[in-house]
Image: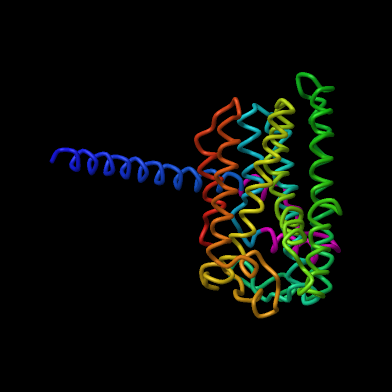
């Protein structure tokens, strides 16, 4: 009769370890998210001059909060590969500005027509549609102004030529993943499918998710590694990991649109079904979508484990992104 007792004890020990790990991760996530938020806010423009109103709208949009996942990923991989903070911190702010601009434009009446984002009124709902449009434009342009400022910091690095090369590569990744071959391309395909939802197949849906969502997450995973001088094979692996995580993240978002609440998510829910929009859930059901999220997450974790540099926090962050409830 001792075997069952031993098994029970083992299970209890495992459960206690999981609880300790969860508590540690939640504390670390809170600390690191606050640090990331501080860095992002440090680069926001001053609200002054004749452009003050649009700058207010820009800052209102960024200060709406959020998980700061994309800049947090830059910071984690940058630290893992030993990048200089003067190089990666402006990129953190720039990536969050680009992500925020996309949300400001997504919420417009001409796009998703959302009145609430992150639990408070969307930018257009406060400042008007026209001001929201140029606030998004302002964030996109100011993001690159911020990132390009890093080139000056290269002059003070130990090897300016090497730093300049890394920053140039990071700038290319930032621009490409935000543009027509990344997020904008994904958004274009998304708009087209809304015009002809019955003609949308899984291949097109995966294209939308991998470009509209995963491309920006790829910037988070790879820019920090590039700035830290990571080997190309590591950068390539991180890009694949980001693709899996980004796709799983978006499918999870589709699931939450069915199972979540407006209070938890801070935005309207049920809109996909109401508008007849094709999602991974509508194609494969909640069970099939959930299985795909698990499959993509497991593949990403295996690839992450194969990287030569280990990080305790990053695998847990990855799982929290794909298993979130809000």
Residue 79 lies, with reference to residue 242, above or below; the image says above
* Location of residue 234 in the rendering, given as x and y in whole percent from the top left corner: 68, 30
Residue 41 lies, with reference to residue 168, above or below; the image says below
Residue drawn at x 57%, y 44% is: 35
Residue 64 lies, with reference to residue 115, above or below; the image says above
The image quadrant where one finds the C terminus is bottom right
Q: Is residue 269 or residue 301 the one in the foreground?
A: 301
Residue 186 in the magenta stretch? The answer is no
Would you say 148 lies left or right of 250 here?
right
Which residue appears farthest toward the top when viewing the image? 158
Would you say 17 lies left or right of 308 here?
left
Residue drawn at x 62%, y 44% is: 72
Which residue appears farthest toward the left when viewing the image? 1
The image quadrant where one finds the N terminus is top left
Residue drawn at x 67%, y 67% is: 279
The residues colored magenta run 37-62
* Location of residue 132 in the rendering, given as x and y in whole percent from the top left corner: 79, 69
Residue drawn at x 57%, y 54% is: 293
Query: What is the chief secondary structure element of the magenta stretch?
Result: helix
Q: Quadrant of residue 251?
A: bottom right
């Amino acid at each position: 009769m001792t075997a069952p007792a031993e098994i029970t004890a083992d299970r209890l020990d495992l459960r206690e370890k999981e609880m300790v790990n969860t508590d540690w991760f939640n504390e670390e996530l809170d600390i690191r998210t606050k640090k990331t938020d501080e860095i992002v806010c440090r680069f926001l423009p001053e609200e002054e001059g004749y452009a003050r109103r649009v700058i207010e709208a820009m800052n209102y949009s960024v200060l709406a909060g959020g998980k700061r996942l994309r800049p947090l990923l830059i910071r984690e991989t940058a630290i893992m590969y030993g990048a200089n903070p003067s190089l990666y911190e402006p990129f953190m702010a720039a990536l969050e500005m680009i992500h925020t601009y996309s949300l400001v434009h997504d919420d417009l009446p001409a796009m998703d027509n959302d009145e609430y984002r992150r639990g408070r009124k969307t930018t257009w709902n406060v400042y008007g549609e026209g001001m929201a449009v140029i606030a998004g434009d302002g964030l996109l342009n100011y993001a690159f102004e911020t990132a390009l400022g890093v080139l000056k910091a290269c002059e003070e690095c130990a090897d300016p030529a090497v730093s300049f090369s890394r920053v140039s590569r990071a700038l290319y990744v930032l621009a490409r993943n935000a543009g027509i071959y990344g997020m904008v391309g994904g958004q274009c395909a998304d708009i087209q499918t809304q015009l002809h939802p019955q003609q949308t197949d899984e291949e097109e849906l995966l294209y939308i998710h991998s470009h509209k969502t995963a491309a920006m997450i790829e910037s988070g995973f790879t820019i920090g590694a590039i700035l830290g001088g990571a080997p190309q094979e590591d950068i390539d692996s991180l890009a694949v990991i980001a693709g899996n995580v980004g796709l799983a993240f978006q499918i999870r978002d589709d699931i939450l649109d069915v199972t979540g609440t407006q209070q938890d998510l801070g935005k309207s829910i049920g809109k996909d079904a109401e508008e007849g929009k094709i999602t991974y859930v509508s194609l494969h059901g909640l069970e099939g979508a959930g299985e795909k999220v698990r499959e993509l997450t497991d593949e990403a974790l295996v690839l992450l484990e194969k990287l030569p540099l280990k990080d305790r926090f990053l695998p847990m962050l990855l799982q929290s992104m794909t298993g979130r409830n809000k």
